[in-house]
Amino acid sequence: MTRQVLRGLGDSLAIAAGYVPVAFSFGLAAVQMGLGAPWAVAISAIVFAGASQFVLVSLLAAGGGPLTVVPTIWLLNARHLLYGRVVAEQLAQARPARVRPALAFGLTDEVFACAAARLPTLAPAQRAGWLAGLQAGAYGAWIAGTWLGAETGAQLVDRIPLLQEALQFVLPALFLSLLLQMGVHGRGRALWGAAGVTLLGLALGPAHVAIPAGMLAGAALQLLQAHVDEDGDDE
């Protein structure tokens, strides 16, 4: 188990490298909107969901109450229901079973993309440990980046005005690297299926319909591929 956790930590480096600057920008934004550094770090530690955290602090800064904030954040994170279903298939043999709910907390977009590509290539007994290491590395980077942004972000932006604009390109670059990794690990069907459905949806309708449709298509293809791989292993 320890070996797999360390292996997961090593594989988390690409995600961590992308998370630090994004979390840095969140910590900076939270402080600029009137939240203190401890609150910014607490939000990252509890919520651990990039886009949702930016929306959360914006709503709080605008005076939003629980009846506005909670449903909004829940809807933004509803896609994790799909993520959990896909990963649960890969962790069906994880022991003890109680580790699976714990691993659900760290299932971010980037962790899911990496896990969907890598978990099917690991032996069932190795998957939970590897995923725990991957999530630990990503989580630690997110907390550290938030703290740095909250404590030092304002001073750095004053000295380097272009820094805030440059940070906007980090997350798209991270997603691109993860998409390439999915192709390398042979998960191209889900990737191309999701892309195709999303593009078709954008051509025929609004983005808020096309993007969830693409996510559903990719998740469905990933589940189908996992079942095909398991059937092949049984034979």
Image (spheres, rainbow, N blue to C red):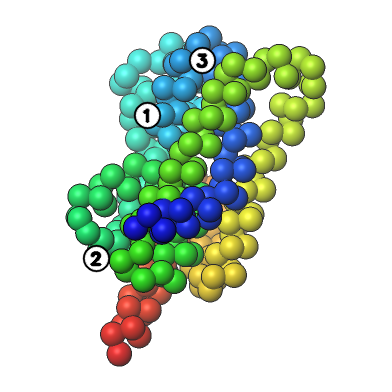
Residue drawn at (40%, 47%) of the image: 107
Q: Residue furthest bottom?
A: 235
Between disc 1 and disc 2, the foreground one is 2
| Total numbered labels | 3
Q: Is residue 217 something that shows in the picture?
A: no
SS class, disc 1: helix
x and y percent of residue 233 in the render? 33, 83
x%, y% of residue 79?
39, 48
Q: Is residue 117 above or below residue 158?
A: below
Residue 162 falls in which quadrant of the image? Answer: top right
- What label sits on residue 93 in the rendered view? 2
Q: Which amino acid lies under the numbered mark 3 shown in the image of this protein?
A: Ala
Secondary structure under the numbered disc 3 in the rendered image? helix
Left or right of 80? Residue 178 is right
Task: Identify residue type, mark 1.
Answer: Ile
Q: Which residue is mark 1?
A: 46
Q: Decide: is 34 above or below 224.
A: above
Q: Is residue 103 left or right of residue 41?
A: left
Query: Quadrant of residue 202 in the image?
Result: bottom right
The Cα atoms of the two marked residues, 2 and 3, are separated by 41 Å
Q: Is residue 170 above or below residue 28?
A: below
Asked if the residue at tag 2 contacts the one at tag 1, i.e. Cβ–Cβ closer than 8 Å, the answer is no
